Image: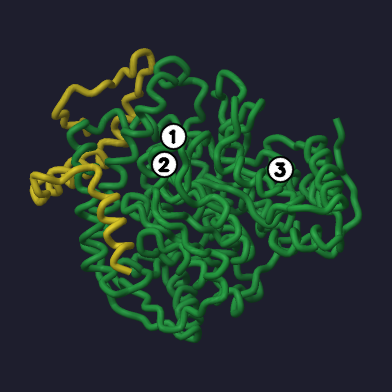
Chain colours: A yellow, B green
Amino acid sequence: MGIDMKTARPANLGGHDVPADRREAMAPLIKRLETVAGETSDMLPFSADGSDMQRVMRADLAKR
Amino acid sequence: MTEITDAPATEFDEASALEMALAIRTKKVTSEALTRSALARLRPVHDACNAVIAFEDDEALAGAEAADKAVAQGGDLGPLHGVPLAHKDMFGRAGKRATWGANIHPDTPAEADATVIARLKAAGALQIAALHMTEFAFGPTGHNYIIGHARNPHDRALITGGSSSGSAISVATGVIPTAFGSDTGGSLRLPAAACGIKSLKPTWSRVSLAGAMPLSGLHDCIGPLARHADDLALVMSLIAGPDPRDGRAADVPVPDFLGALEKSPAGFKIGIDDAVNGQSQAGVLARLESARGVLRDMGCSEHAVTFPDWPTLEALGQLLLLPDVAAGHAAFMRNRADDYGPQVRARIEVGHFISAVDHNTALRARGFMLQKVLDETFGACDAILLPVFPDPVPTIAELDVADSQSLLPALARITLYTRAINYLGLPSVTLPYARAGDDKPNGFQLVGRPFREDQLITFAKAYEAAVPPDVARV
């Protein structure tokens, strides 16, 4: 099973080769994570931001 | 170099840190007697379980002598004055080089103590050793192909859980009352459960990470492992709060954690998602049911809840974590890949194969998903009940899979109930199941609302009345 690459990915990490058997082993996980990322981006508001979590945490604390 | 191999026991050897400090302050025991006893008991524990990376007898004894002198002179003494502790070897300490449980270490000794170490030192605590950890804190089992695997003090065939393995061993065996660990994907909760003790993973950003080995700053949390709820409260009261050295440390009010010990959890609402919990083995569910009975007896009410989509939360956690870890290790992987153990290297490699877009999607979704979980899952609940391990604690042998094809599925099963909580940034207290006869240790977690570690401490203290701490005899 190969990895369906959306972008170029480094089988060679600048001197460290990731052996084919380990690339094969991780392929199902990578595929599943790509699917989840795609589904998640479909439902996210355009304004979603990495800093939202801290705002949400503080707001929940303030309510209690 | 001094090696303490024998010392008289004291009546406070297995007391909580809170009780030890009081006994030292009131001259019922000396810091030196407690420290000698702890050092003497640590050696056989290490021989049996591989708990220690470095013994620090001379420094510990010098610190104890100074602590006893200060007691004799009177004056203000810190809340941990003279108490012997030890921690996972991932914290910077001035003049020392932490090993990170790895072949790759810091280039130079630390210039300053990590903030959490400095705060315990300021409270008077001593450090008697640097403790075992999974290589780079990146593994949930206690396996370490560089310094040897950690062994469970209750049953040497079992894993300790990781990555805070040495801390869990040392606390579970009663050598020390409490120790620091860290939790990026379960590294406080899994060792606590596997070794039959408690831990408190704080809300992400509640505790400064300054000076600690980073694994993923987006997830890392430092917190205590302990046998007694009192010590979870005491340590949290010392380390929580903002820190000028760490811009991430949240500037939000720090509750009265010690006061939380005096409160009752009666009336607290506990959410239970039967579908999520139902992914556990039947034996684990039976033990979880027993814990639910204790919580009901404490006056807590149960409420059926539903997580939006547990596999999605879990996957988003990996999308955020793996590239972050890979980025941190990118230079080492380019130049020193052969210095890694096989499991950690294989897991770091995965992060290189996740696109930046997908990683950032997980980051952008974090607040959205947390809001959804707070609104739709927690609702009015104070905490959500989850297992820690979905299965009985596994053996070292069955997970000794190096970098084989079974590694990733095996570790995914171990962390089924932990990684999603790191993604959401929520606090979690781990408590041991009651044990009878030949029962092996295991534990469950109560996941709290953001920054409500005080409620989790209230739960832990009340639970302890029904399920008292015990000590693993090695």
Q: Which residue is mark 2?
A: B407
Q: Secondary structure at mark 1?
A: loop
Q: Point out the residue furthest to the front here.
A: B75
- The answer to whether marks 1 and 2 sit on the same chain is yes
Q: Secondary structure at mark 2?
A: helix
Q: Are marks 1 and 2 in contact (CB under 8 Å)?
A: yes
Q: Provide residue B65's location: percent of width, then percent of height.
A: 85, 43
Q: Is residue B123 above or below residue B342?
A: below
Which residue is painted at 50% across and 26% down in the image?
A: B340
Q: Which residue is mark 3?
A: B127
Q: CA distance from mark 2 to mark 3?
A: 35 Å
Say which quarter of the image contains residue A27.
top left
Q: Is residue B9 above or below residue B402?
A: below
Q: Which mark, by number, is residue B403?
A: 1
Name the amino acid type tagged 2: Leu
Q: Provide residue B113's location: percent of width, then percent of height.
A: 60, 34
Which residue is painted at 36% across and 69% down in the image?
A: B384
Residue B413 visible at all: no
Chain identity of mark 1 = B
Name the amino acid type tagged 1: Asp
Chain identity of mark 2 = B
Q: Is residue B334 above or below residue B399?
A: above
Q: Which quadrant of the rendered structure holds the C terminus of chain B?
A: bottom right
Q: Provide residue A30's location: percent of width, then percent of height.
A: 24, 38
Q: Provide residue B382's location: percent of width, then percent of height.
A: 36, 72
Q: Mark 1: give few (<14), some (14-19) or many (20+) Cα within 10 Å.
A: some
In the picture provided, is B340 more to the left or to the right than B273? Answer: right
In the picture provided, is B265 more to the left or to the right than B192? Answer: left
